[in-house]
Amino acid sequence: MVDVAIIGGTGYGAIELLRFLHNHPYVQVKKVISHSNSGTELAEVYPHVVDIIDIKMADLNIDALAQEVELVFFATPSNVSKNVIPALVDKGVRCIDLSGDFRLRDGKQYQTYYGEEIASQEYIEKAVYGLPEVNKEAIKQASILANPGCYPTATTLGLIPAIEKELVDRSSIIIDAKTGVSGAGRSLSLNVHFSEMNENFKAYKIGVHKHIPEIEQMLSERANEDMQVIFTPHIVPMTRGIMSTIYVDMKDNYSTKQLVDTYQTYYQDHPFIRVRKEGVFPSTKEVYGSNYCDIGLYADERTGKLIIVSVIDNLVKGASGQAVQNMNIMYGWEEATGLDQLPIYP
Ligand SMILES: NC(=O)C1=CN([C@@H]2O[C@H](COP(=O)(O)OP(=O)(O)OC[C@H]3O[C@@H](n4cnc5c(N)ncnc54)[C@H](OP(=O)(O)O)[C@@H]3O)[C@@H](O)[C@H]2O)C=CC1
Ligand SMILES: CC(=O)N[C@@H](CCC(=O)OP(=O)(O)O)C(=O)O
């Protein structure tokens, strides 16, 4: 058994991690750390786990934690883990970070989009970007695992085959993305207040969203050249789910069938990617509560554009499920261990 801890105990990322880790055959959650509710039973904050998970949340004590566990999940807001992970890693503890602190390599971009200085270079260099479908070998050895953002997961998985196989004009990418409200986390804010959200549909952070450099970094790495994208996020009145609808110019007159075949072949060994057959497009509910990323494709022969629809559950493949998938790879376990639930439907 591997003993693990979760930091950021009362947040959505943490409670979703517990949903998967509770039934994981090789892991025991020894500690849940909370800076706001230390000493409180987890079930008092989340009554749905009463009589199932019996854990009292604790304060962060780095030395004690390093004695007790060998892996720590950070489900904390940005600019928190960068101040704690180096000390844990120096003590031999592996860390999986759900926040953005170790995702970007460029300090200037981090400063621009996260408003603070990036983590120290030595630890940025140790960090592995944990998109298992493209980075599996590096993930196996990671001491700091930067779990990808929710929008970048849906978006890059939708684009990578077309980019690597050079099927599209890399300068023509437009991403129209939609998220459910749980993407904003559990803390209260006016923006996600019921009467602001219900019966409403908003675009936000156009041109300044922190996932722009993350998407560009990942795609540029796959393309071996600098790439830029247009990315417009929206928030819609549903609890979970992301749909990234992507428009890009095709280099040739491909048919939808050719593209579906290419994508199905590209992802054939990846248990959580389901490429839909021609004429079928996924909806967010079809992946709800699960670690799947479902992709639908349409080659618009009339305009020469490829339209890609990629959906995930933001809290699962977009955060905690992908973190567990990464942990499985880091420890040499079967990638889908603890993650093989069917999506919840309806
Ligand atoms: N929600 C989503 O869909 C996704 C979230 N993420 C990322 O995962 C991380 C967690 O997100 P999520 O769980 O949704 O967010 P929440 O706001 O729900 O939870 C974050 C938790 O972090 C703890 N926390 C808050 N402020 C601080 C602080 N200053 N220092 C230490 N701990 C703090 C709090 O828990 P406590 O008081 O118990 O310590 C809080 O509940 C974030 O970085 C987020 O961007 C990534 C992908 C998707
Ligand atoms: C609705 C909403 O606010 N969503 C969040 C999702 C981003 C997120 O969770 O951040 P990381 O994945 O980078 O950690 C946002 O757009 O900022």
Image (spheres, grey):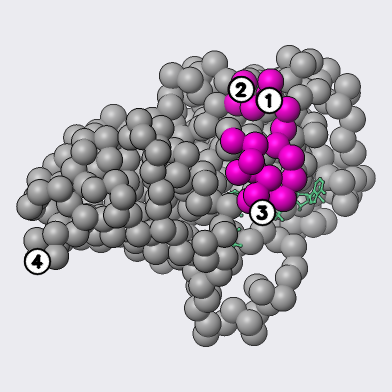
Q: Residue at x 54, y 21 (%)?
A: 330
For label 3, the residue is 12
Q: Is residue 119 found inside the magenta-colored segment of the image? A: yes
Identify residue for label 2: 125
Quadrant where the C terminus is found in the figure: bottom left
Q: Name the residue rendered at 17%, 39% in the picture.
A: 262
What main secondary structure does the magenta stretch of the protein show?
Answer: helix
Q: Nearer the viewer, mark 1 or mark 3?
A: 1
Mark 1 and mark 4: span between their CA atoms?
Answer: 48 Å
Residue 167 image label: none
| Proximity of marks 3 and 4: CB atoms separated by less than 8 Å | no
Disc with the residue nearer the chain's start (3 vs 2) = 3
Q: CA distance from mark 2 to mark 4?
A: 45 Å
- Left or right of 245? Residue 24 is right
- Give the label, 3 or 2, closer to the camera: 2
Amino acid type shown at disc 1? Gln
On screen, residue 53 versus residue 37, left or right, reads left
Q: Which residue is mark 4?
A: 302
Mark 1 — residue?
Answer: 121
Find residue 321 and report its horizontal and vertical position in percent: 52, 42
Q: What residue range appears in magenta?
A: 106-127
Does residue 105 show up magenta in the picture?
no
Residue at the spot 63% in from the left edge and 61% down from the top edge: 184
Q: Which of the pair 78/25 is nearer the observer?
A: 78
Which image quadrant is residue 219 in? top left
